[in-house]
Amino acid sequence: MNKLLAGLFSGVLMACTASMSWSQEMQNPEAQGLNGQGLKIQGEWQQGAVLRGQVVPGTQVTFFDRKVRVAEDGVFVIGLGRDAPASVTLKTKQSGQEQVHSFAVKQRQYRVQRVDGVPPKTVNPPAEALARIRKESALARKARKVDSVRQDFRQAFQWPLLGPISGVYGSQRVYNGEPRRPHFGVDVARPTGTVVVAPVSGKVLLAYDDMFFSGGTLIVDHGHGLSSTFIHLSKILVKDGEVVEQGQPIAEVGATGRVTGPHLDWRMNWFKQRVDPQLLVGPMPDYE
Ligand SMILES: [Zn+2]
């Protein structure tokens, strides 16, 4: 215990000497300074954010009524959905001592995006498609429930492909003039067949060739409930259960499902909370 505390305190000094990136901090948790309540959160509390936390190892963490998985070194990850409330609480419990931490969540403004020319049946699905749609969404829901010990989320995220961003997280969608659910991914417009690589390593939870709305669909687990979903794919290059490395080709861009043209739609979840991949990966680098 004393050794641990000493390590944490020396960590405070270290943390002051340089500002570290997500991946540096995640790989060097002992370099993080915990506050007086034994908690540190890195990242901005805003809708769509993924936040990384640090507690004294062995501490229990509860968020959105979920017991959060905490790694052996005290690192954990949580996510805030598109419509996360303006105030949230996180509970910690260590050596029988329970603490409630409150945080203000920045509320974002989302745009309305009109998308015309998608196949009409994908806006108003025929009755005979409903059973298929239900089955497919149950598969995706099941995949996103997985709470694994993987810790791929500690790596620095990279874009799964480079190109023009044609759709952003959160925007209210109007398809062929009819309002539908918001858009939860970031869209990158590239021709069919363009290679998509893994943004960090992970394990394939679902590889499904043709879903009604999302077409070729691939879900990859990055650990602790954080997952990536890639949709509208023309081709999936990996199989269920396969472990993929960061940068490994995993799929090809397509125009399958509810689309007007080829693009990659990259979504991320922390369990049911849909989070904004752009907040993790940073700005799109220059591309040709
Ligand atoms: Zn999209």
Image (cartoon, rainbow, N blue to C red):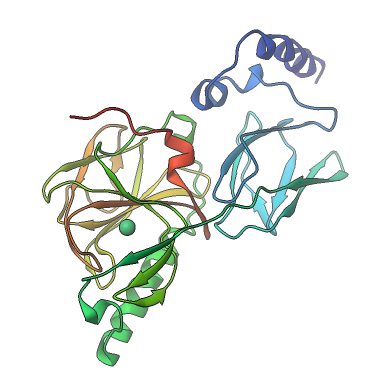
Position of residue 97 measured from the top left corner of the image (x, y, whole percent):
88, 42
How many labels were placed on the picture? Answer: 0
Residue at position x 35%, y 45% in the image: 203
Position of residue 163 measured from the top left corner of the image (x, y, whole percent):
24, 39
| Residue 85 visible in rendering | yes
Report the quarter where the N terminus lies.
Answer: top right
Residue 72, by quadrant, is: top right
Q: Is residue 107 above or below residue 17?
A: below
Residue 58, by quadrant, is: top right
Task: Identify which residue, 277 or 250, lies in the foreground.
Answer: 277
Residue 226 is left or right of residue 259, and the answer is right
Residue 203 is left or right of residue 39, and the answer is left
Q: Is residue 34 above or below residue 209?
A: above
Q: Is residue 18 above or below residue 93?
A: above
Position of residue 117 measured from the top left corner of the image (x, y, whole percent):
21, 71
Extreme residue toward the bottom, this view: 127
Residue 225 is left or right of residue 196, and the answer is right
